[in-house]
Image (tube, rainbow, N blue to C red):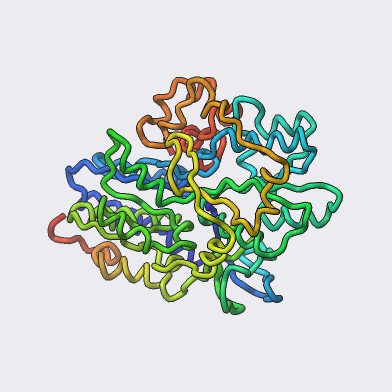
Amino acid sequence: MGDAGTERFRDPELMRRLAEHLHRVVGRRDLAFMHVCGTHENAIARHGLRSLLPDGLRVIAGPGCPVCVCPPAEIDLAVRLALEHGVIVTTYGDMLNVPTGRQSLAEARANGGDVRVVYGAADAVELARATPRRQVVLLAVGFETTACITAAVTLADPPDNFSMVVSHRLIPPAMEALLEVEGLRIDGFVLPGHVMAVTGYREYEPIAARSGPMVVTGFEPVDIMLGLVQLAELAVAADPRVANAYPRVVRREGNTRALAAMESAFDVSDARWRGLGSIGASGLTLRPQHHRLDATRRFGLEPDPSLPEGLPGCACGQVMLGMLEPEQCGHFGQACTPDTPWGPCMVSFEGTCRNRYLYQGA
Amino acid sequence: MCLAFPMKLIEIDGQCGTVLEGAVRRDVRLDLVEGVEVGQYLLIHAGYAIQVLDEAEALETVELIRQAYPYLVSGERSGDG
């Protein structure tokens, strides 16, 4: 496959024909599809795919950016670890500039905290091995795609000076919560291809049967457009199935080895989402046999419930539900830009506001 | 966050492997995939292989478009357009 393989999924002529077909399928209908994946939003915005859609088809960017859904109180735990406990805090790059209402991790670093960006959880473990006299904490965020890697690290016997703040989130409970949001109409879901690579889509079939069609798709323009065509066909036929437009990566049963690792490492727990509140069984905590790796236990920390969900006037919560377009937020492009983000949706490269700001008119 | 890339496995050393795509070469962990072989394409996320790509299915996606929407690929227009 390689380069040539990827090229096949970017063919402009095929894109044009898929778009024409999508127009025919949708016709004059009004349809609202939601994706729940920041990487999809980035690809849709970067390739200007919305400009190819029929007028009546709206593709809403749902709460699919892990950086964006992570509540400030959990980032604040890592800030306190860096500033008050002198540990080396490691996390993924996008987390650094998320405002918390107190200090962001970037500000904590400017104020003397040892905050470092890692590419993956294994790098944080390597850092712990290389600095045995220091405590190293990983702020582990992300959906199932990334949670299985945190699980692998947990099961690979990390050193005693390594621990984690586990802030992973699970997609299916969030989708069920979205279906309950009043005033939010969703005619179909575009499922996140790389979460599905891990989990498969069997678990989604009963949700689809109750709520409407879904399509699993990848991230190249042809993948996304083919996914939208299949989803539109299912929606028009009122056929509440899960279609797989990404079979080169996603199998119905997922990656059983990765799922087994998650099962061994984590228990499922309730968790808070920015914009959605607390959602039952949507988070992960370390199982009791791995509590030695739990940084909140090791350092006796609790999330501060007094921290607000966002800065005053920040509309990220509503933007992530598709209830507001970024341009409808008073801060968008004014007080809030990629250089001076007011909320997480302008920070992360997966954030809806950042992608709208950067690729407007693309 | 869920960015992941297909890369070709060119070397295996226990639970570690080396993958290549274009000029990019990296070491990755293979803990989460089973029975992989040199030459296969792996989906790489945050330093781990999280899935094995199916070459046949990749061809099939294009084939799927060809079969389900033949007029799209051949350029012929369907009658109902």
Q: Residue at x 63, y 69 (%)?
A: B30
Task: Answer left or right for A191 relative to A231.
Answer: right
Name the side, left or right, on which A115 lies relative to B34: right
Q: Closest to the observer: A260 or B65?
A: A260
User: On the image, which quarter does residue B67 sit in?
Assistant: bottom left
Q: How many numbered circles are shown?
A: 0
Residue A31: x percent and y percent?
24, 43
For the point 80% across and 57% down, the residue is: A129
Q: Is residue A295 above or below residue A203?
A: above
Residue A359 seen in the current view: no
Report the residue that reaches farthest toward the right: A133
What is the x, y in percent for residue A34?
Answer: 35, 45
Q: Is residue B53 left or right of residue A183?
A: right
| Residue A250 showing in the rendered view | yes
Residue A41 lies in quadrant: top left
Q: Percent x, y for residue A252?
A: 39, 67
Q: Residue at x 77, y 28 (%)?
A: A111
Between B4 and A267, which is closer to the camera in this rendering? A267
Q: Quadrant of the C terminus of chain A?
A: top left
Residue A77: x %, y % from top left: 65, 37
Q: Is residue A352 left or right of residue A295?
A: left
Q: Which residue is situated farthest in the front direction here?
A: A288
Q: Please, is residue A281 above or below residue A102 in the view? A: below
Q: Residue at x 36, y 62 (%)?
A: A245
In depth, the one of A132 and A234 nearer the eye is: A132
